[in-house]
Amino acid sequence: MRDFREIKVWEKAHELTLEIYKATAKFPREEIYGLTSQTRRSSSSIPANIAEGCGRGSNAELARFLQIGLGSASELEYHILLAHDLTFLPVAVYGLLQSRVTEVKRMLTSLLQKVRAAR
């Protein structure tokens, strides 16, 4: 069992989730159960899956949850793009969030490769 708080990608994903919550607070009210909820859910799923994987007993299980987290990051990437295209996100905010998602995806991919190699 690992302490997820010590994993750098968890920290980055947690920070990204906080940023997503701030950005989506400005979405239109009618999106509260739509895009706002989906965007927040996909962002919080990334650090949650890292944490759950760390609580499991094997590298194989950790790898499985890291893979799920990577899928959530891709989902978030689309939600951010959709929000931008719907003009819910200003260009500057979109660019910042997009770069943060890309960074988290790269870090997750790297960690996943290391965990799989350690099996």
Image (tube, helix red, strand yellow):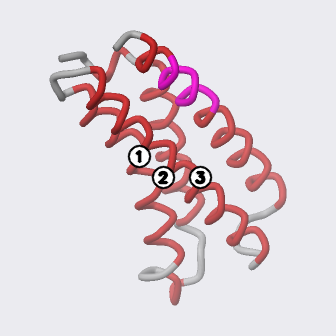
Q: Are marks 1 and 2 in contact (CB under 8 Å)?
A: yes
Circles 3 and 2 in contact, beta carbons < 8 Å: yes
Q: Position of residue 19 (x, y in %)?
A: 55, 47
Q: Is residue 111 rendered magenta in the image?
A: yes
- x, y percent for residue 104: 58, 34
Residue 33: image location, x then y, percent: 42, 82
Residue 78 falls in image quadrant: bottom right
**Residue type for callout 1:** Ile
Q: Which residue carries the number 1 mark?
A: 68
Our reading of the magenta stretch's main secondary structure is: helix
Q: Secondary structure at mark 3?
A: helix
* Residue at image coords 70%, 71%: 82
Tag 3: amino acid:
Ser
Of the numbered discs in the image, which one, if any, rests on residue 72? 2
Stretch in magenta: 106-113
- The dot on residue 74 is 3
